[in-house]
Amino acid sequence: MKKLFLAGAAALALSLCASAQVKVLGDRIAVNTANNSLILSARSGSSLGFLHFGARLSDADIEALQFAGVRPLNAYPAYGQGEIREDAIAVTHPDGNMSLDLVVENVITDSSRDTDIACITLKDKVYDFRVKVYYKAFKDVDMIETWTEIVNDGKKPVVLRKFDSAFLPFHTGDVWVSHLYGTWANEGRLVEEPLQRGTLRIENKDGVRNSHTSHAEIMISLDGKPSENTGSVIGAALCYSGNYHLDIITNDTDYHRLFAGISPDNSTLTLDKGESFRTPELAITFSDEGLSGASRNFHRWARAHKIAHGDRERKILLNSWEGVYFNINEPGMDQMMGDIASMGGELFVMDDGWFGDKYPRLNDSSSLGDWVVDKNKLPNGVGGLVETARKHGISFGIWIEPEMANTVSELYEKHPDWIINAPGRDVVKGRGGSQVVLDLSNPAVQDYVFSIVDNLMTDYPGIDYIKWDANMSVSSHGSSYLPADRQSELNIRYHQGFAAVCDRIRAKYPDLTIQACASGGGRASYGVLPWFDEFWVSDNTDALQRIYMQWGTSYFFPSITMASHISAVPNHTVYRVTPLKFRIDVAMSGRLGMELQPKDMTPEEIAQCKQAIADYKSVRPVVQFGDIYRLVSPYDNLGVASMMYVGQDKSEAVFYWWRIDNMYDSHLPRVKMAGLDPDRNYRIVELDKAPGRPLSFEGRSFSGSFLMDVGLEMPGGFSRDLQGYASRVLHLIAE
Ligand code: GLA
């Protein structure tokens, strides 16, 4: 670790102190990845200046920045002294002073195998109050994480009123933002809009599930209307599991100003003497290869550094929910396990409905909290099921919802004070008319939540996978654990408690696969993925709507995180009937699974799924670890959506084409591929083959440049089998 005190000209003497990615050049700090640079000016006694984030700059260009007209902006603006615009931090000192005046005290750089870090300590000119601003550059991926540590070195408590992770400005022009919105059963919908005067606020205040209605990730297209494969794009993702805000403020300056962090609303924090608070990371990336380029940066970073088991192939599974709902019983589970095993699946997940003793879980109105097996449904317990799975040659997974209780449960009878609720008020109940959220700010509750997983894993070490659900918001603000003067900290303490539990689980069970589910896609977030392998994209498994949701979700999250299941028709949420081929072809673009009752399928359907699973296995490394290139957006209403994954060495690719408009006489565009090696020839093999005559290009080879400059003509007309829902999945194999 190198500590540098920069003081005007004296700092120049230290100017050659450089590590691989973070360089200190005079009073400049360059935080570099292979293709990105973030440049700061850090002069002792002055505010920290932001100069550049975007394309990688040479040392000479960094030195010349001032001649390019670039003027430093305050990199972490504080309220109350000089900053008249929005601020990243606001505090109240013990004497009531509401202002901060932060200047650079020192710079520390540090290096590890994967990253270089710059930590700039800012100190208030008068008070013993510091903010350490961190920038972490990754050596193998284009991503920089930035966050702060806020430290009260004074003798009395300081109240934090706002405490953003980061501030990031980008120059005005024809600048657009892309972000995700939605609701239950319609998560991850894409919205693209030009940035105009005013404030664009993306926020979430659910308390628990923070990605249903909005997402804490954005893309900023700097060169006009967003384009998938060209143009300069900045991506940013706030890695937090709780309430957040991302504000983009556009006013009378030449910069759009992004502030991102934990939502400070109703969440003031008090730092006692000597205490500090670490804000969550904002991960930022830049690409000059359009939105898909920024997505590839997110995906590579996620797989290599951010998500649980990012380098591990995901198993093909059957989940019991849409197949049997709460109707769990031993013969039924045995049959489903046998069926998925015979189709080539590798894992069976028993969903809700298996637990409860005094109050058996027959529907959603009781039993959360009572994590003991219902012996009437499962006389041989979970152990019996794990053994049955073993006999079928597959792994076993189980559903839990550990952060929650029902008021109809033995847990609530014993610990009514463990739930979140405003003191002295009626209990606000959610799902099933009796669901409540447990108070994870309470260490006793943390121990209990940890014990749910710990007991299951100790009693049944054969459990391979946990589906961790969360189906309620913080709807009544109050904790019986937190003292009266700390009630405002509940939302933040809850997520600190959640993180502490997840840390303990991962320390003891590093190999366990865990899915983050939260009423569908309520936890598609880099705030939870460090502990979780994947998330359930949505409770809506309708293939057509999934194309839109998975498209948006893929902006930020790699395919291995996106649980994508083939389900029955009519679809259980929207009642749409789509052909099995179409449902398979959509599910195959994510982490493939099934969500239906196999015994209701015809032998032909079983055979088709068996073949599809075998096909998916043959391309799994490309789908799960390849580079994404989105080609035609469903949001552009061209009648078709198309995307592809290209293997890292470009020797293989998987191309998806889905017809999304089934009006007769709609003329579909020919799709040009992307990301291939122009000089290699690729042989085309159709996967999940459509009935009827083979494609004219089946088994034929084309150059990468032909496929990218001209493209193949997909037969996408109407047929008795596929109606208007034609779809194709092609495997491209370099020769
Ligand atoms: C939530 C999940 C579903 C399912 C049910 C079980 O709604 O999103 O996938 O697990 O709970 O009750």
Image: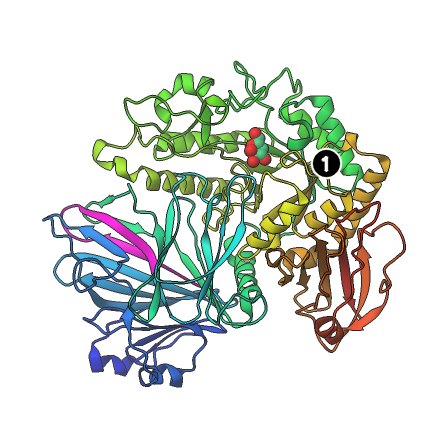
Residue 227: x and y in percent read 56, 67
Q: Please give left or right for residue 693 compared with residue 324 in the image.
A: right
Instruction: Identify the residue at horizontal 30%, vertical 22% (top origin).
Output: 425
Q: How is the image coloured?
A: rainbow
Q: Nearer the viewer, residue 129 or 690?
A: 690
Q: Main secondary structure of the magenta part?
A: strand
- Tell me: 40 left or right of 635: left
Quarter, ligand 1? top right
- Is 161 part of what is drawn in magenta? yes
Q: Which element carries disc 1, helix, strand or loop?
A: loop
Q: Which residue is mark 1?
A: 569
Q: Quadrant of residue 195?
A: bottom left
Q: What residue is shown at x 48% (from left), y 24% (from top)?
A: 369
Image location (x, y in percent) of residue 363:
57, 21
- Can you tell which quarter of the image residue 127 is in? bottom left
Q: Which residues are magenta?
A: 144-166
Q: Nearer the viewer, residue 150 or 429?
A: 429
Specify the quadrant of the image occupied by residue 128.
bottom left
- Count residues near mark 1 (Cα–Cα under 10 Å), then give few for <14, some for 14-19, many for 20+: some
Which amino acid, by three-letter code, is at mark 1?
Val
